[in-house]
Image (spheres, rainbow, N blue to C red):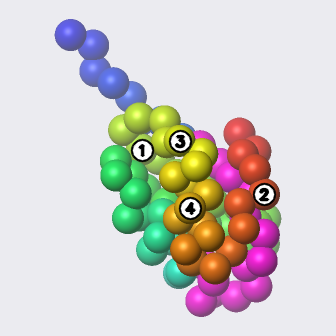
Amino acid sequence: MTEQRPVTQTYAVTGMTCEHCVRAVTEELFALPGVEEVRVDLAAGTATLTSAEPLPVESVRAAVDEAGYELAGGVA
């Protein structure tokens, strides 16, 4: 049996302007099933997720929307 490696995906997020924004996005993304790590880069406007399996973009978009921001698309 082969060990499954975590998947890292990076998304562009628009509308973030401060550390409160970073915390809100981080909290919503961490709530997604299977998410192991979230890194939000305010200056770059990105959110990088590490999860057990690839996450559906619709789920990521819904979480970012719930936080009050917009997913502009995946960048990696």
Q: Is residue 39 visible?
A: no
Dot 1, how many residues are within 10 Å of its Cα: few (below 14), some (14-19), or many (20+)? many
The residue that label 1 is drawn on is 51
- Where is residue 32, by image quadrant? bottom left
Estimate the x, y position of residue 71 in percent, counting from the top left.
Answer: 71, 60
Q: Earlier in the sequence, mark 4 or mark 1?
A: 1
User: What type is the residue that disc 4 sits on?
Assistant: Ala
Please give the residue where the numbered disc 2 appears in the rendered image: 72
Q: Are marks 3 and 4 in contact (CB under 8 Å)?
A: no
Earlier residue among tags 2 and 1:
1
- Report if the CB atoms under discs 2 and 1 are less than 8 Å apart: no
- Crowdedness near tag 3: few (<14), some (14–19) or many (≥20) residues, C-alpha within 10 Å: few
As for residue 46 lying within the magenta part, the answer is no
54 is higher (above) or lower (below) than 48: above
The magenta span reads 9-22
Front label number (4 vs 1): 4
According to the picture, the residue beneath numbered tag 3 turns out to be: 56
| Residue type at numbered disc 3 | Pro
**Distance between the alpha carbons at the discs numbered 2 and 1:** 20 Å
- The alpha-carbon separation of the residues under discs 1 and 3 comes to 11 Å
Q: Amino acid at mark 1?
A: Ser
Q: Is residue 43 above or below residue 20?
A: above
Marking on residue 62: 4
Q: CA distance from mark 4 to mark 1?
A: 17 Å
Q: Are marks 3 and 2 in contact (CB under 8 Å)?
A: no
Determine whether 13 is above or below 24 in the image.
above
Cα separation between marks 2 and 4:
12 Å
Horizontal side, residue 7 vs residue 44: left or right? left
